[in-house]
């Protein structure tokens, strides 16, 4: 570990990495980087490199952990063994367990969990390279991963720390400032400015805390802007009118579901018209199922049936000249094509108990 610097801020008011006291480190984000996750985001902030992945909403196992009226949001913060100078022992530690708990809670006011009773939304934040401020970096990445997964949210969450070095408040601490400074105050907030995470190491006066929160507010405004830019570049540049229309439609869907007290899982981007069209299509498919199966069977020419039975004969050494397509056969196929994750989820749930 590097030694404590003599001074953290030079005579020009610049910090060791050339920033002013109220400046955040450069941040870049990229959404949708993992094909197997429902949502993901890779974020670099200064020398921090963090990957966030969201899985779900999916059924929570074991079932006794399910919440009847809302989804459970599980957040796991993890530092890769190679992410710091001294290798970190793999597996959960007191520090990572605490960070996971408070970071998950930072999303409480925004994630609309009521749409997914009995489900779980898993958020994994993996720190690949750490340089102070990893819990805040992970929250900024997790917000975008949640949006990428299509989880309905009332707004975004941004996070940034403030601290004190050389008797001055500094925004977004770098490693030496975090290690040798007088205080570290990581904060997360919603777009409305509601504080959803606040932790503190070291000593700050009440006045310094108040001033520090204001500095973080400004830092978070910049982070919200970066997050929104990423969202616009990923999801297109829909005009404001279109966004409002979509929001109104969703509000109507939510209200009618609330009224019937039959809250169902809904996709956040599907309009009512699309839902109706899909329902009609499914109904029509059900009705026509027998006819289609019949058509499918009839679609084989006698020659094709002959070829197929010859091949089967070669394989099984029997005369297989007749075959039947039944509904049962099809449903058996369906059950065998069940996603692999289904069973492993159960296992994972048991492990996570
Ligand atoms: N750190 C480390 N080993 C650890 C924990 C942290 O080297 O076991 C480093 C890492 O660079 C981290 C920094 O110390 O970013 C500050 O850690 P802190 O606990 O304050 O959390 P963070 O600021 O990363 O949220």
Image (spheres, rainbow, N blue to C red):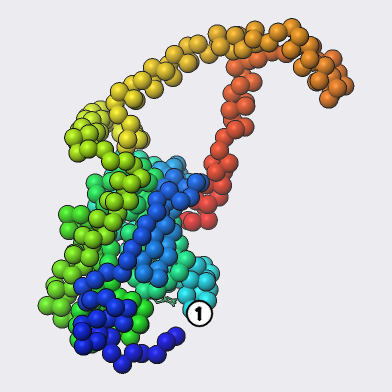
Q: Is residue 42 left or right of residue 338?
A: left
Question: Where's residue 334, x and y in %?
Answer: 58, 28
Between residues 75 and 216, which one lies in front from this camera angle? Answer: 216
Compared to residue 134, the image places residue 316 above or below, namely above
Q: Residue furthest bottom?
A: 6
Q: Position of residue 63 (x, y in %)?
A: 45, 44
Residue lying at 68% horizontally and 10% vertically, measured from the top left:
300
Query: Which residue is rendered at x = 32% and y = 37% of the image?
Result: 268
Q: Residue at x 59, y 30 (%)?
A: 335
Considering only vertical position in the picture, is 178 above or below 24? Answer: below
In this rendering, position of residue 342 left or right of residue 155: right
Q: Quadrant of the N terminus?
A: bottom left
Depth check, front residue: 5 or 287: 5
User: Is label 1 within 8 A of ligand 1 (CB to nearest ligand atom)?
Assistant: yes
SS label for mark 1: loop
Give the labeled residue for mark 1.
86
**Residue 353 as seen in the image, left or right of residue 310:** left
Q: Is residue 265 above or below residue 280?
A: below
Q: Is residue 314 left or right of residue 49?
A: right
Quadrant of the rendered image containing residue 343 = top right
Measured as percent of width and height from the top left, residue 231 is found at: 31, 47
Say which of 115 and 16 sits in front. 16
Q: Quadrant location of residue 27?
A: bottom left
Quadrant of the image where one finds ligand 1: bottom left
Compared to 328, does 89 lie above or below?
below
For the point 33% across and 54% down, the residue is 143
């Amino acid at each position: 570990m590097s030694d404590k610097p003599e001074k953290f801020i030079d005579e020009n008011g610049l910090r060791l990495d050339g920033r002013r006291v109220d400046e955040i480190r450069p941040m870049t984000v990229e959404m949708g980087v993992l094909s197997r996750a429902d949502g993901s985001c890779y974020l670099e902030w200064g020398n921090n490199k963090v990957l966030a992945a969201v899985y779900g909403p999916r059924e929570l196992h074991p079932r006794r952990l399910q919440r009847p009226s809302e989804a459970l949001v599980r957040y796991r913060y993890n530092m890769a063994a190679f992410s710091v100078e001294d290798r970190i022992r793999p597996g959960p530690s007191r520090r990572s367990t605490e960070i996971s708990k408070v970071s998950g809670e930072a999303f409480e006011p925004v994630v609309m969990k009521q749409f997914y009773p009995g489900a779980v939304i898993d958020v994994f934040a993996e720190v690949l390279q750490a340089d102070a401020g990893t819990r805040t970096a992970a929250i900024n990445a997790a917000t975008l991963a949640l949006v990428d997964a299509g989880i309905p949210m009332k707004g975004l969450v941004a996070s940034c720390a403030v601290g004190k070095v050389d008797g001055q408040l500094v925004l977004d601490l770098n490693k030496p400032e975090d290690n040798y400074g007088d205080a570290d105050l990581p904060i997360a907030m919603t777009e409305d400015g509601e504080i959803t995470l606040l932790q503190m190491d070291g000593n700050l006066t009440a006045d310094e805390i108040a001033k520090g929160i204001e500095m973080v507010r400004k830092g978070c405004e910049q982070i919200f802007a970066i997050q929104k830019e990423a969202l616009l570049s990923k999801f297109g540049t829909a005009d404001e009118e279109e966004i409002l229309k979509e929001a109104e439609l969703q509000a109507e869907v939510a209200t009618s579901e609330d009224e019937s007290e039959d809250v169902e899982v809904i996709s956040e981007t599907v309009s009512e018209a699309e839902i109706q069209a899909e329902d009609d299509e499914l109904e029509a498919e059900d009705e026509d199922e027998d006819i289609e199966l019949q058509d499918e069977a009839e679609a084989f020419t006698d020659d094709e049936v002959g070829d197929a039975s010859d091949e089967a004969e070669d394989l099984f050494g029997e005369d297989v000249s007749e075959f039947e397509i039944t509904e049962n056969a099809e449903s058996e196929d369906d059950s065998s094509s069940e996603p692999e994750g289904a069973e492993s989820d159960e296992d994972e749930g048991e492990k996570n108990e």
